[in-house]
Amino acid sequence: MFPTAVVCGNTSVIKPSERDPGACMLLVQLLQEAGLPDGVVNVIHGEHEAVNFICDSPDIRAISFVGSDQAGKHIYERGSRNGKRVQCNMGAKNHGVIMPDANKENMLNQLVGAAFGAAGQRCMALSTAVLVGEAKHWLPELVERSSRLRVSAGQCQRVPDRATSQWGTDRPSVRRKAICSTKEMKDSIRKSMVR
């Protein structure tokens, strides 16, 4: 979101997730190394107090948010009440429709990556896939490929699965709730295969 703001001549304040601020900090470091002047892109860390500061500060005139429904509603209400332009993309997840004429190998690899990349914790992760017609028969292979994923520390070099030459690691989950959701998703897929 900040590139558009900066290109239009504005400064930007980023508040990354308190659960995983590392990527944001690396991005800002790269911007500094590229020569972006100090103060153009700023980072504020924290939870509720940091969010409320952004919503209340008269120096911040607009807010763009991607995240949970609960946080988005709070940000929209508080920011709007303070006269800010606020846009919130809340509860974002992607859905996919897989047609029977899709390239099977490519589609299976793309589905696994879209659903489980970054342990499914990115806002645009694929959480629902509808397999149409003959594509429904790909479900066992989809389950088999996804079951080969292994959690790594995130910084580890990714190594291919020896049997398939497919990448077989993923990033760890940042919350227990995410682990439970992943387990529920796998169980749901297995149950649908039994029918």
Image (cartoon, rainbow, N blue to C red):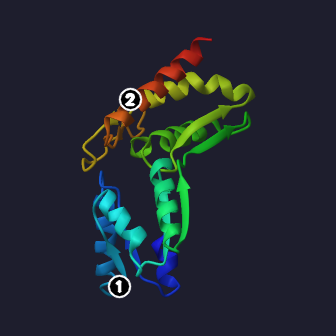
Asked if residue 45 can be seen in this view, the reply is yes
First reached walking from the N terminus: tag 2 or tag 1: 1
Q: Residue at 53% of width from left, 29% of height from top?
A: 142
Spot the residue most to the top: 194
Splitting the image into 4 quarters, where does residue 195 fall? top right
Q: Position of residue 70 (x, y in %)?
A: 47, 48
Residue type, mark 2 in image: Cys
Spot the residue most to the front: 81
Q: Is residue 105 left or right of residue 55?
A: right
Q: Position of residue 162 (x, y in %)?
A: 35, 32
Residue 164: numbered disc = none
Q: Residue at 47% of width from left, 56% of height from top?
A: 74
Q: Residue at 64% of width from left, 41% of height from top?
A: 96
Asked if residue 15 can be seen in this view, the reply is no
Q: Where does label 2 land, which residue?
A: 180
Q: How many marks?
A: 2
Q: Where does label 1 land, which residue?
A: 36
Q: Is residue 69 above or below residue 178?
A: below
Residue type, mark 1 in image: Leu
| Element on which disc 2 rests | helix
Q: Is residue 31 above or below residue 48?
A: below
Q: Name the residue nearer the viewer: 192 or 59.
A: 59
Q: CA distance from mark 2 to mark 1?
A: 41 Å
Q: Nearer the viewer, mark 2 or mark 1?
A: 2
Q: Name the residue nearer the viewer: 50 or 1.
A: 50
Q: Residues within 10 Å of mark 2 (few under 14, many from 20)?
A: few
